Each structure stands twice: as structure tokens, then as C-alpha cells.
Amino acid sequence: MGQKLPGLLVVLSGPSGVGKSTVAAQLLKLPDYVRSISVTTRAIRAGEEEGKDYQFVSREEFVGLVRQGELMEHAEVHGNFYGTPKEPLRRAVAQRQVMLLVIDVVGGSQVKNKDLDALLVFLLPPDQAELARRLVGRATEDVSQQTVRLQRAEMEIHRARDVYDHLVVNQELNQCVAEVDQLVQAGRRRLKDRQDAGIELYPGLKSQPE
Ligand code: 5GP
């Protein structure tokens, strides 16, 4: 009674501008949620903090991490490299936390195939026009970068339909957050049932670096 549910790795993806960061920020206010801090080779943006938003590294450092098997997944997005460090994932599930991985669909697909019992959630915009409006409104990219991001968004949505466990439309923020949290808690209860049945959880986290 009252025992905390098992931890869960939750991949949160969606096209650039769909509101991933905002949804993630709301989820992180709920009990048990923590965020995976990715490493990236992209330049730091105004308002971002080293070690809080990302660990910003050089290309050489990134390649070193890949070689040492320190990354659970990695991908090139818009010409920069991004990856998820492994060790914090192990710590999070050991502490029964819900670890949010805010990553792209290439990374999500890699996580899915690694026996991590991860829950994959893809956020959809209410429609493509709304996505374009949000992206332009953000004004952190110039026009050619915005076009690249919109094209990539279409590719990601297509791919996510095959790979992700759930597609959630981000129409209204609070409702979207509540919906994702319900999926997460249901996922944790499923893991608890499996644990009670004697099945080992997260076998992929035990595996040695490749
Ligand atoms: P941004 O540069 O705008 O912060 O992120 C660009 C894209 O990279 C987003 O789609 C984001 O989800 C993705 N991303 C961030 N961190 C990671 C990561 O560790 N792995 C992968 N595969 N994608 C990531």
C-alpha cells in the first residue's frame, strides 16, 4: 500500500514548434518527473543555460562520447548532433522517477528498440498552419531555417505514426499535459503488474556499452 510506482522512461517528441518544451515544463512540475539533459553540438541560444537545457559540447567531445558507448541514442538534427547520456537514465529508474526524454523521432526509434520499457509520446499540432504560426512567432530562426524545420516536421509526423505508442494533439496546454500524465501513470501501473509477476524491468539498461 502506498508504494511508489516503478520509474518510467518517457520519450516526448513532436515537430519543432509544437510546444514540446512547454508541455515538458508543465509535466516537470508534477511529482516524480525529471528531465534527461541531452548533449548537443549546437550553439547555445540566448536564455539557455549550460547543464540545464543541454550539455553543450564540441564535435570532438560528442564523437568521443559515442565511441565510449556513453549515449543511449544519438541523432543529427538540423546539422547538429544530439544525444542522451545513459547513466542518468539508470539513476532515474532506480529512484522510481519518470524521466522525460525530449528528443527527435530518430532518437525515439532507437530508444524503442532497446528493451527499456519506454513510453513513446508524439505531440501533434492542431494543424500544420498552426505549427507554422508558432514557429514564426518564436522568431529564433531565420526564414530558411524555418522552412527546413517545417519540412522536417512533415517527415517526423509521418514516421511517428508507425513508431510511437501514442499521438497526442497539443490543442490546449493543460489538457495535453493531463493526457500525457494519464498515459504515463497507466504505463507505470502496467510495469508494476509485470514486476509483481516476476518479470525483470528495463533489461536494456543493464546491457553493456556497445
Ligand atoms: P533544439 O535545437 O531546438 O533544442 O532541438 C532540435 C531537435 O533536437 C528537437 O527536435 C529535439 O527534440 C531534438 N533533440 C534534443 N535533444 C536530443 C537528444 O538527446 N537526442 C535526439 N535524438 N534528439 C534530440
Image: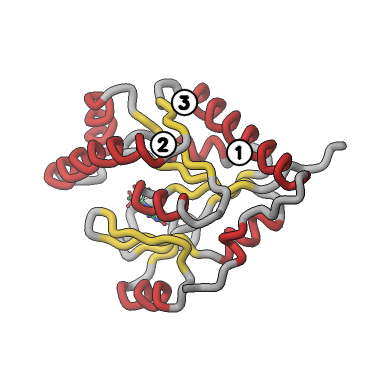
Name which residue lies at 73% across and 40% down. 193
Residue 207 percent location from the top left of the image: 57, 68
Mark 2 or 3: the one toward you:
2
What's the amino acid at mark 2? Phe
Quarter in which the N terminus is drawn: top right
Q: Nearer the viewer, residue 131 or 63?
A: 63
Q: Label 1: which residue?
A: 29
Instruction: Say which mark, if any, is on residue 173.
Output: 3
> Is the distance from the Cβ of mark 1 to the nearest ligand 1 atom less than 8 Å?
no
Residue 206 percent location from the top left of the image: 61, 66
Height in image: 188 above or below 177?
below
Q: Label 2: which residue?
A: 122
- CB contact under 8 Å: marks 2 and 3: no
What's the amino acid at mark 3? Leu
Q: Give the Cα distance between marks 3 and 1.
A: 14 Å
Q: Nearer the viewer, residue 169 or 39?
A: 169
